[in-house]
Image (spheres, rainbow, N blue to C red):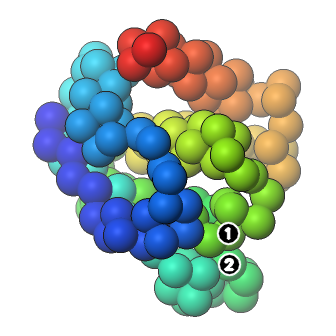
Amino acid sequence: MQLEIFNTELLQSIKPDFSLSLEDISSGYERLFLKNQLEKINIVFVSSEYIQELNSKYRGINTPTDVLSYSMLGSKKDGEIYICPEYIYTSFSGDEFEEEILRLIIHGTLHILGYDHMESLNDSPDEDMFKLQEKLLLCYKKICS
C-alpha cells in the first residue's frame, strides 16, 4: 500500500503543536487497512476555500466541510481524501482535534472502500459506517499507543 500525505504545513499552521507524526499516522493506517488491499491513497490537507470549491463542484453544496473523499476511476483500492484542518479546528481543539483528524482519515477511507451513510449527512451513531469508523479509531489508538 502506498499512502502519501500532502500539505502538512497547512495542518501545522492551524495547530502548531500537532503531536502525531506522519510516520505514526502512516504506520497505523497501513496496519489498520492492511486487509483491504488498498493500493494508493493520498491524504491532502486543504484550505476552507479549496474544500468549498470541491464541495460545490462535486456535491452542489456551496459551503466548506470537514472531509471529502474520491475513489479514482471507481476503484475501491485507490483514492484521495481531502481534509480541512481550519474547518475542524472551529469545533475541536487539543487532543480532540488530533482524534478528529484520525477519525476523518478513517471516514474518508471507508467511503473509498464503498461504505456510505444511509440516513443523511448527519453523523448517526446507529449507522453501520459510523460504528465501524469508531471501532477502527479505537483499534488505531491501540496500535499506535
Task: Provide the residue designation for mark 2.
Answer: 64
- Which tag, 1 or 2, sits closer to the chain's start? 2
| Badge 2 amino acid | Pro
Give the total number of marks visible in the rendering.
2
Tell me the kind of residue under disc 1.
Answer: Tyr
Is label 1 in contact with label 2 (beta carbons under 8 Å)?
yes
Q: For the residue labelled by badge 1, is the local secondary structure a helix, a strand or a loop? A: helix
Q: Along the horizontal axis of the image, is 39 left or right of 49?
A: left
Q: Position of residue 16 (x, y in %)?
A: 49, 61
- Pick whichever, 32 or 20, lies toward us: 20
Q: Please tell me how crowded label 1 is: few (under 14), some (14-19), or many (20+) other residues with Cα within 10 Å.
A: some
Label 1: which residue?
Answer: 87
Residue beneath the point at 28% across and 64% down: 6
Q: Is residue 23 above or below residue 128?
A: below
Q: Quadrant of residue 124?
A: top right
Q: Quadrant of the C terminus?
A: top left
Extreme front residue here? 17
Q: Does 6 sit above or below residue 131?
A: below
The relative height of residue 68 versus residue 100 in the rendered view (above or below) is: below
